[in-house]
Image (cartoon, coloured by chain):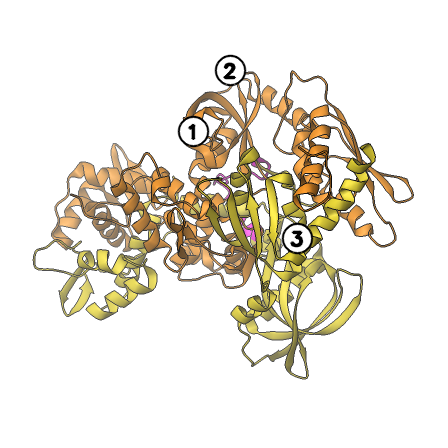
Chain colours: A yellow, B orange
Amino acid sequence: MTIFSEIYGIYFRIVSKIMERESVTETEIHEIIKKYGYRETDFLMSDKIIPNKEGTDWGLLKGEKIFHRVTENKPVKIFTELYKRWLKAKLNDPKIYLFLEKDTVKQLNDRLKDVQPLYKTENFRCSDMFSNGDDYYDEEYRKNFRIILSAIKHKTLLNIRFVSGHGKNIYGTFLPLKMEYSLKNDKFRVYCCQIRNGLNSGNGIINISRIESIETDEEPYRKHISMKKYFSSRRCKVPVTVVVTPERNGIERFLTEFSSYEKQTEKDPLSENCTVKIWYDIQDETELLIRLLSFGPVLEIVSPERFRKLAFERIEKQYRLTCAKNK
Amino acid sequence: MSEFSELIKNFEKTRDYVRDFFIYGFKVRNDFTGKSSRTYDDQKRRIESWLDGYMKYENAKHGKQISINLDSGHIYSNPLYRAYYSKSFTDNDIKLHFFIMDILAEGGKFSVNEIVSSIDQRYGELFEIQTVRNKLKEYIDEGILVRENNGKVMYVRLSEDTLESFMNYNGIEDALSFFSCTSEFGEIGDSILKSCGKENNIFLIKHNYISHTLEDIILLPILDAINSKHYISFRTASTKKNNMNNIPKVIEKAVPMQIVSSVQTGRRFLIAYYENTMRFFSFRLDQIKQVNIGGYCEEYDEIAERYNRDKEKAFGISFGNLKDMRVSPLKIVFEIDEKNEYYVAERIIREKRNGIFEKKGENIFVLTLDISDPNEAMHWLKTFIGRIKSIEGGTSFVRKRFEEDIEKMYCMYGGQNDNIQ
C-alpha cells in the first residue's frame, strides 16, 4: 500500500475527469489535460486517450469528433484503505477539533474502527518545537478559530480585540485573508488587513491565541485584496547575501535548514564556497539574523551592510563577554 | 531507443534529483556524476514538466544551474507531491481499472471469470484470467474492492466507502485542506482533495520543509515495522564527504524506535537500535534507501524502555559517545537585561527542551542542560550570541570550540584581534 501508485496518479485522475462527461470533443480533451496535467502531459497523453485508427489508444473513448466513454457509468471514486488509514491517524491529532465537532470525530472513529491508523502520534517526536504552542483543547480558541476560518471563506470583516506581541491592547476591524501554521511555534496566525472607513489601512498578522474577543460583521468585504501584493509588501527589498564554507558540512546543513526560504545559490568551483541570497519576510528579520549566527564561522553575512552590522554588534558583545577578558 | 515518458517506475532515482534541484540549486550537469547524460536529461525534462513555473535557470561560472525555486511559506500545495502522482503503468492497468470499476459500479458481486467475460462482451477486450485476478487482488489490498468467498470461488464487489460519503462530514474539507499541507503524509490528504476536485487556498505553513515529502516513500515501511515491532534493514548514503566517500552503507537488523524531526534544522531522523553496536543511532531519513521489514524483534519492548530512558538525555537526536565519560552537565550563564530584554529569557524558557533555567542574580540566568552530547546544543546556543556570559561543564571540546568560533567570527566581521591565526 503506497501513495506511489498509478491509481492516485495524475493520468488516472485526468482520464477520470474526461470519462465523467457524457460526451467530449477533442478540444475539450486537450483543455482538461492542460488544466490538470503537467507541462508535457497533453503532448504525451492525448494520443492515448483520443481514439485513433491504428488502435494504439487505450480504448476508453469511442466516436469521431464527439467522443463518448465506452463504459456505462461515470467512474466511481473510492475512499481507499490508504486514505482511511491516513484519516484515522489525523483523527488523533488535537488540531482535528479545530475543524470537526466532537460528534463528527466520534462518528468517523466509529466508521473507521477496524482500520489501523497509518501511524501513531508517538511514532513522531519533534525535538525542538517551542513549548508554548497553542492550546487546541481550549473551547474558546476553537470557537475563535472557526469564526476566522468562516470569515476567510466568506470574505467578511471581523471586529477583533487582541494583545500584540509587544503587550499592547489592540481593537479594530480586520479582514482575515489566510491562516498560517508555524511548525516551529506550533501556533496559528491570521494574515489580515485592518479596515478603516472601508479602506485597507495596513497589513498585519494576529496570533489566534492572543485574541480576547471576536465579533463577526455579516457584510462581506467587496474590495479585492491581492495576496501577491500583500506578500510582496512584507518581503525584504534587498536580499541578505551570505557565503557558506564547506567546513563542518556547512553547505549541506545550511541549505537544508534554509530550504524553506526563497533563495538563489551559486558555488565557486575553486574555493567550493557557496554564495546564497535569501529573501525573507521583514517581520522575521531578527529570527533570520540569529539563525545565521548559529552557523558560527562557517558562514559570513556579506550584505547588506546594515544587516552585517547587526550581526557584528552581537558578535562583538559576545567577544567582550567570553573572549576579550581571557586575553 | 525508448520514448520519453514523464511518468516514472522507480521513485528512488527521481527522489535524489528532485531533492538536489530543490535543496542545492547550484548543481550543474557535471555535478550529477555516476549517471549517464541521457539519464540526467530525462530526469531533468521530467522534473521540468512536473514543476513548470517553479524551475529557475541561471548561468553560473561553472555551467547552467537548474533549481526548484519557491518560498515554501507561500504555497498552498506542495509541488513536490507531483513525484508521487507520476507512477508509470501499462495499457492493461488503465483499461482494467476503468473496466472493472464500471462493471462493479452497477452493484452486485462478480467472480473473476464473470469479470473477464463481461470485459470481453462490453468492451471487446480479452484479458488473461490471471491478469484480471492479479488486478482484483491488488484492488482488494487497496480497499477499492471487497472480497467475498463462496466456497472456493472468490467474488468481489465495490467498496461502499465512496469518496463522496467521506466528504459529506461537516468540516472535513477544511481539515483535509490543512492536513494536506502539513508533514506526515500530506500528499495523501492532497490526493483526496484533488480526487474530488478541491484544493487548499486558505492554509499556509511557516517553516515548511517541503522536501520531507520525498522521504514518505521509505517512512511507511519504517512505521509499519515500529508498530509491529519488527526489525528493518536499509541502505544509507551519507552526503558527508568524510563518510566513506558517499558509498552506501547497508544496515542490517536495526530496531526502529521513532521518527524525530527538527523544525529548526529541517532534518528528520530515524532513531534505531543497531544490534551490531548495541546502541541507538540516528539515521537521516533523506539518506535512507530501500527499507526492508525483517523478522519480529522479541526484545522490542525492552529496547523501547531503554530508548525512553536514554532520550531524556538527548537534546535532539544524538545519544553521544558512550565511551566518553567526561561529559558533565552543560551550564550556560546568560546576561539578560531583565527590564528591557526579558523576551530573551522567555525565548530560552520555550526553547530549552529538557534544560533547567534559573535566575541566579540581577540580570544573570543559568541554563543547565544535562545531556549526553553537549555539542548538539551548540548550534542552538549560538542563536544567543551576544548574551552568553560563560559556558561551563559539557566537554572541553565544546567550550574551546565556542570560544574559537567567536574569535573567528569577530575577526571575520572586522574586529581587531592580533591573536587569531
Q: Is residue B127 left or right of residue B20?
A: left
Q: Residues within 10 Å of mark 2 (few under 14, many from 20)?
A: few
Outermost residue on the front side: it is: B418
| Chain of the residue under the numbered disc 3 shown in the image | A
Disc 3 on helix, strand or loop? helix
Disc 2 on helix, strand or loop? loop
Quarter occupied by residue B2:
top left
Outermost residue on the bottom side: it is: A197
Outermost residue on the left side: it is: A53
Amino acid type, residue under disc 3 in the picture? Arg
Q: Is residue A279 magenta?
A: no
Q: Nearer the viewer, mark 1 or mark 3?
A: 3
Callout 1–callout 3 Cβ contact below 8 Å: no
Amino acid type, residue under disc 2 in the picture? Asn
In the image, the segment drawn in magenta is A105-123
Q: Label 2, on which residue?
A: B276
Q: Label 1, on which residue?
A: B246
**Residue drawn where x is 48% and y is 24% of the image:** B230
Q: Nearer the viewer, mark 2 or mark 3?
A: 3
Q: CA distance from mark 1 to mark 3?
A: 35 Å
Q: Nearer the viewer, residue B115 or A10?
A: A10
Outermost residue on the right side: it is: B362
Q: Label 3, on which residue?
A: A308
